[in-house]
Image (tube, rainbow, N blue to C red):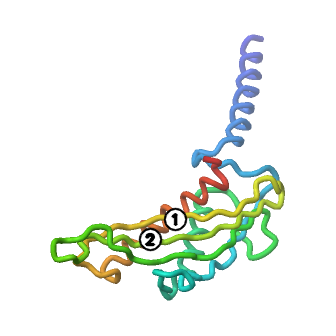
Amino acid sequence: MNNKVFLHLSIVFCHIFFISCGIYSFTGSSIPIGAKTFQVNYFENMAGNRPGSTVEPGLDRDFTVALQDYILNQSNLNLVNEDGDLIYEGEITKYGVTPMASTAELTAAQNRLTMSVNIRYINTKNEDDNFEREFSFYFDFPGELQVYDVKDDALREIFERLTQDIFNQTLAKW
């Protein structure tokens, strides 16, 4: 009799344990109730409209894909092209290099590549979560190098940080 009671209690305990694990995510994400899909609309590159910024060909496409990939990898949401429960849209507002330190000859000793994106986040399940905000990050590199020398590493680091910050603000609530 004790074995049957122990077996039933063990089954109930295991069932409760596994159900409770479904509430939590090891990535720290907190998916809104009822949200199963997300969409990332194309981020148009509007950086050329801002003084000191340039338009980098393909930057808009690459950032859009990077954000889609990050959310796919960090959540259990499905990517859709339209009618998503969670919608990310916006534009690239800045992409430019500024000198951060100079030498005695008045040349740049260190440069900074900065990228900013304006994000509009729409939660169709809970309008209280909706917001519009600018996110920005940078990559510092030696003054003797040109942007094209560091572009791949710079964009990889900038995209990683921007997508992580956007994810944390929208789904991790950090």
- Within the image, what quadrant is residue 65 found in? bottom right
Residue density around tag 2, few if under 14, some if 14–19, many if 20 or more, within 10 Å: some
- The amino acid on which the numbered mark 1 sits, given as a three-letter code, is Ser
Residue contact at pointers 1 and 2, CB within 8 angstroms:
yes
| Image x and y of residue 106, in percent | 21, 76
Task: Name which of mark 1 and mark 2 comes first in the sequence.
Answer: 2
How far separated are the C-alphas under marks 1 and 2? 7 Å
The residue depicted at 47 percent of the width and 64 percent of the height is: 137
- Within the image, what quadrant is residue 103 found in? bottom left
| Image x and y of residue 63, in percent | 55, 75
Can you say which quadrant of the picture contains the N terminus? Answer: top right
Which residue is label 1 attached to? 136
Residue density around tag 1, few if under 14, some if 14–19, many if 20 or more, within 10 Å: some
The residue depicted at 49 percent of the width and 72 percent of the height is: 115
Query: How many numbered discs, if any?
Result: 2
Which residue is label 2 attached to? 114
